[in-house]
């Protein structure tokens, strides 16, 4: 299938139009016309080569919403016209213990990311959602509930599941006290989801400049991390902290905020952190952990949860030819929404 997208051709992260071929449908494949593609900070990290050399040309994008345009003969769950999504992975071995209980992201044989990784069968490099079409194995296609606005649903496939999974796995419920470090693309979804679960949510930020935004989506307010007196007064006041900061930073200012048996879960930074101090961990049986997206079953769960609770990401719609301007803003940081590309503006 001939298609077109926006690709990086080197680690300067400059995106240009790119014509390429999607594979012919295998028996269990679903062909999708992409309508909206979210722009994740990890896309920028990847095409920049921040996480290692990349197989350029590379089409990023793993927050994908569209409609089915064709299916292979063995497909049973989808038909032409269905509203569907694709997230951060498009395949796994489907045979190991992790795949067997719905944790494909931890596949013992390695899951296949949506872009920048060899296809399990052909070996060709997967290309992502900054494109007009995509072909995906049926088991990795998600149903988009009718209650969700297609134009705003795409970031749920990454920002949503990345924050929903630790909230669920650490047992957040009514009355839980949750801190969220950073109010960006991940952070604002963590706030919305935790509030819908009944938690009391506090945003942790270097300043209170986003306090109105935090309160507007349900947080009780902002705790300014640079205010030593306020941070000391908030000691042992949180059960769970979701850390969405995507760069190297100091955890030691946050761990004393955890109550006994509390956890700080890293979902942002992939790479080094400042050297941890163990005193707050040992003295409070506190822990630092990490979390990586969620499995397909859990990703469908967050889509359904968002539909049930009328949760949509905060989105700014852009055209595909505005992606370089969006990346320039992402490099500066400090935005509390997700860019979403309207792919109808992309023509073959």
Image (tube, helix red, strand yellow):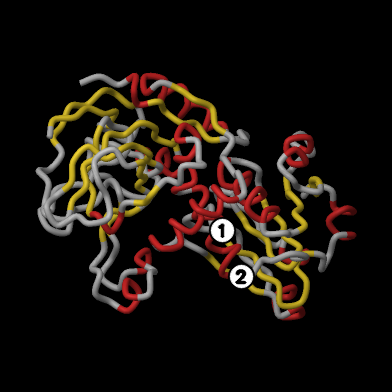
Q: Secondary structure at mark 2?
A: loop
The image position of residue 186, as x and y in percent, is: 56, 47
**Disc 1 to disc 2, C-alpha distance:** 22 Å
List the residue tagged with mark 1: 273
Left or right: 14, with 272 as reference point? left
Left or right: 240, with 162 as reference point? right
The image position of residue 315, as x and y in percent, is: 55, 32
Looking at the image, residue 233 lies above or below residue 157: below
Pointer 1 or 2: first along the chain = 2
- Which one is closest to the eye, mark 1 or mark 2? 2
- The answer to whether the residues at label 1 and label 2 have Cβ atoms under 8 Å apart is no
The one nearer the camera, 337 or 82, is 82
The one nearer the camera, 29 or 210, is 29
Q: Residues within 10 Å of mark 1 (few under 14, many from 20)?
A: few
The one nearer the camera, 82 or 230, is 82
Q: Residues within 10 Å of mark 2 (few under 14, many from 20)?
A: few
Image quadrant containing the C terminus: top left
The image position of residue 311, as x and y in percent, is: 60, 44
Corner quadrant of residue 208 = top right
The residue sitting at 32% across, 71% down in the picture is: 99
Q: Secondary structure at mark 1?
A: loop
List the residue tagged with mark 2: 170
The residue sitting at 29% across, 28% down in the picture is: 6
The residue sitting at 15% across, 39% down in the picture is: 22
Image quadrant containing the N terminus: top left
Corner quadrant of residue 275 = bottom right
Looking at the image, residue 294 lies above or below residue 316: below
């Amino acid at each position: 299938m001939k298609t077109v997208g926006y690709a990086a051709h080197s680690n300067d992260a400059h995106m240009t139009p790119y014509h390429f071929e999607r594979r012919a449908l295998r028996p269990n494949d679903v062909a999708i016309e992409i309508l909206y593609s979210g722009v994740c900070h990890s896309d920028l990290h990847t095409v920049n080569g921040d996480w290692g050399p990349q197989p350029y040309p590379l089409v990023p994008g793993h927050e994908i919403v569209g409609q089915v345009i064709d299916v292979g003969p063995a497909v049973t769950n989808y038909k032409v016209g269905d509203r569907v999504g694709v997230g951060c992975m498009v395949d796994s071995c489907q045979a190991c213990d992790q795949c067997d209980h719905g944790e494909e992201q931890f596949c013992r044989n390695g899951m296949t990311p949506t872009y920048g990784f060899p296809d399990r069968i052909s070996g060709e490099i997967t290309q992502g959602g900054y494109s007009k079409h995509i072909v995906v194995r049926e088991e990795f296609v998600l149903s988009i509930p009718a209650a969700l606005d297609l134009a705003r649903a795409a970031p749920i496939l990454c920002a949503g599941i990345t924050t929903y999974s630790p909230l669920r796995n650490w047992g957040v419920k009514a009355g839980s006290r949750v801190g969220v470090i950073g109010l960006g693309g991940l952070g604002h979804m963590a706030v919305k989801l935790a509030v819908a679960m009944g938690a009391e949510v506090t945003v942790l930020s270097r300043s209170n400049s986003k306090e109105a935004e935090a309160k507007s989506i349900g947080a009780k307010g902002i705790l300014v991390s640079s205010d030593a007196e306020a941070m000391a007064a908030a000691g042992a006041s949180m059960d769970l902290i979701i850390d969405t900061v995507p760069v190297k930073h100091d955890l030691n200012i946050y761990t004393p905020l955890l109550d006994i048996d509390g956890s700080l879960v890293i979902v942002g930074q992939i790479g080094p952190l400042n050297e941890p101090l163990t005193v707050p961990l040992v003295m409070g049986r506190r822990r630092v952990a990490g979390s990586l997206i969620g499995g397909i079953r859990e990703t469908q769960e967050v889509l359904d949860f968002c539909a049930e609770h009328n949760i949509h990401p905060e989105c700014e719609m852009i055209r595909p030819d505005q992606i370089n301007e969006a990346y320039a803003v992402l490099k500066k940081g400090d935005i509390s929404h997700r860019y979403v590309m309207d792919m109808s503006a992309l023509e073959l």
